[in-house]
């Protein structure tokens, strides 16, 4: 009865692709807690104060039934204002929000154009929905344009949806948003931007890389709350009518218990912190500059972002390098296919305020040694 599952796991092990859960240890070069907010005193105190004031731990139901807490609404009002959108809607997480939006807003007869390196959750949502789906070369606005043109030539009459990340989670590079919005406008298309790794870190007050596109009729943005905001959940910012549509038609929103109201308090407080404490972004930028310089000294490309991928290629070597770094006390993770394309296994060095400059220097010293020694 269990043989086929065991066979699959053995196959994964043979290809150096077996995953297991392990304890958290070592210096944090692996989390997405870029601004160190997950353990911030101000965040913890806000949640503790809300709890003491009677905010319930559980939402107790769907937002459409008894689960709609004032804290959800307060967060959404704050987020709409903060990001400059007409409206925001709070979901339990970024994965479910991507799935929810892409199964609900694009309609039958529409086309979804996914960047080739878009996150798994966008793939999942696009494929589970009713629209046709195609992929475009990574960060290539011309390829997106060509995909939409080809679809129109084949008789496509619906709307096109361009779906990208603003800062790619495994590559740390930025989407060409100026070119993409031009393509979207040219084709009367929607642009959907997943800001998971940019929210809180980039843009004025940490409003993200798509901050100047928010509020437009053809732009929908995802801001996750579990990365730089140090909490969990996700905010979809969009025109009012699209949010109303989601409230009425989005099954993952309707048929699910709402996120904890305490998480809404945490996310709202995190928005205040990113606006009030710009020095966090400045400190992170200094770590990025140092890591980039040390990477270049090793002949590796700089990224200019807090996500620094070191492409190794071979799965086994990537994991051996990660283990070697871990054994020296650096929590660096190897990332293998299918999370990244075949042949591009890598170390994903993530920079956060949970480490300091001396830690970054020590990591690169050790990386230089282990790189030579690891076959
Ligand atoms: C680009 C991107 N989008 C969405 C998600 C999912 O967000 P969450 O972790 O809040 O479910 C992630 C998380 O890894 C991500 O990297």
Image (tube, rainbow, N blue to C red):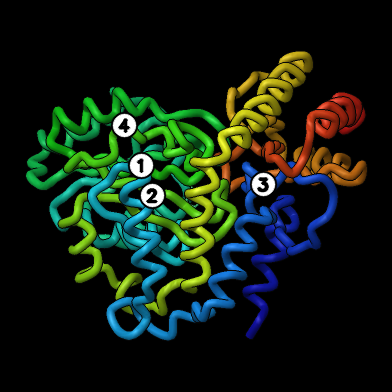
For the N terminus, which image quadrant? bottom right
Residue at (60% x, 46% y) in the render: 337
- Please tell me whether mark 2 sits on a helix, a strand or a loop: strand
In x, y percent, where is residue 322?
Answer: 80, 42
Q: Is residue 1 above or below residue 12?
A: below
In x, y percent, where is residue 161?
Answer: 24, 44
> Is label 1 or label 4 in front?
4
Measured in 3D between alpha carbons, the distance from the residue under mark 4 to the one under mark 2, in whole angstroms, is 14 Å
- Please tell me whether mark 4 sits on a helix, a strand or a loop: loop
Earlier-in-chain disc, 2 versus 1: 1
Q: Is residue 295 above or below residue 244?
A: above
Which residue is under mark 4? Answer: 212
Q: Quadrant of residue 365?
A: top right
CB of mark 1 within 8 Å of CB of mark 4?
no
- Disc 2 under 8 Å from ligand 1? The reply is yes
- Please tell me whether mark 1 sits on a helix, a strand or a loop: strand
Question: In the shown orientation, is residue 15 left or right of residue 161?
Answer: right
Residue 262 appearing in the image: yes
In x, y percent, where is residue 272?
Answer: 49, 49
CB of mark 3 within 8 Å of CB of mark 1?
no
Earlier-in-chain disc, 4 versus 3: 3
> Is label 4 or label 2 in front?
4
- Disc 4 under 8 Å from ligand 1? The reply is no
Which residue is under mark 2? Answer: 222
Q: Nearer the viewer, residue 304 or 50?
A: 50
Which residue is under mark 3? Answer: 36
- Please tell me whether mark 3 sits on a helix, a strand or a loop: loop
Which residue is under mark 1? Answer: 193
In x, y percent, where is residue 138?
Answer: 42, 31
Question: In the shown orientation, is residue 324 left or right of residue 246?
Answer: right
Measured in 3D between alpha carbons, the distance from the residue under mark 3 to the one under mark 2, in whole angstroms, is 21 Å
Question: In the shown orientation, is residue 59 left or right of residue 343?
Answer: left
């Amino acid at each position: 009865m269990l043989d086929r599952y065991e066979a699959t796991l053995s196959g994964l092990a043979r290809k150096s692709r077996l995953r297991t859960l392990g304890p958290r240890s070592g210096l944090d070069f692996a989390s997405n807690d870029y601004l160190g907010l997950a353990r911030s005193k101000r965040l913890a105190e806000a949640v503790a104060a809300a709890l003491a004031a009677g905010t319930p731990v559980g939402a107790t139901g769907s937002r459409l039934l008894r689960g709609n807490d004032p804290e959800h609404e307060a967060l959404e009002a704050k987020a709409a204002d903060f990001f400059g959108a007409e409206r925001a809607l709070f979901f339990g997480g970024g994965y479910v929000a991507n799935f929810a939006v892409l199964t609900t807003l694009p309609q039958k007869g529409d086309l979804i154009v996914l960047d080739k390196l878009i996150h798994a959750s966008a793939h999942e949502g696009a494929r589970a929905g009713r629209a046709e789906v195609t992929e475009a070369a990574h960060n290539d606005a011309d390829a997106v344009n060509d995909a939409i043109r080809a679809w129109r030539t084949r008789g496509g009459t619906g709307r096109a949806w361009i779906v990208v990340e603003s800062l790619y989670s495994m590559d740390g590079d930025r989407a060409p948003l100026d070119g993409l919005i031009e393509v979207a406008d040219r084709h009367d298309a929607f642009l959907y931007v997943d800001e998971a790794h940019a929210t809180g870190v980039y843009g004025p007050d940490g409003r993200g890389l798509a901050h100047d596109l928010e509020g437009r009729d053809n732009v929908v943005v995802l801001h996750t709350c579990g990365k730089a905001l140090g909490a969990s959940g996700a905010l979809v910012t969009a025109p009012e009518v699209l949010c109303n549509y989601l409230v009425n038609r989005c099954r993952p929103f309707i048929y699910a218990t709402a996120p904890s109201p305490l998480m809404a308090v945490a996310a709202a407080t995190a928005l205040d912190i990113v606006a009030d404490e710009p020095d966090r972004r400045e400190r992170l930028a200094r770590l990025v500059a140092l890591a980039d310089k040390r990477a270049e000294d090793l002949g590796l490309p700089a990224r200019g972002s807090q996500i620094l991928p070191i492409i190794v290629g071979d799965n086994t070597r990537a994991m051996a390098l990660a283990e070697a770094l871990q054994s020296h006390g650096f929590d660096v993770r190897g990332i293998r296919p299918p999370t990244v394309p075949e042949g591009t296994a890598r170390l994903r060095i993530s920079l956060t305020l949970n480490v300091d400059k001396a830690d970054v220097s020590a990591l690169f010293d050790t990386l230089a040694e282990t790189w030579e020694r690891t076959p």
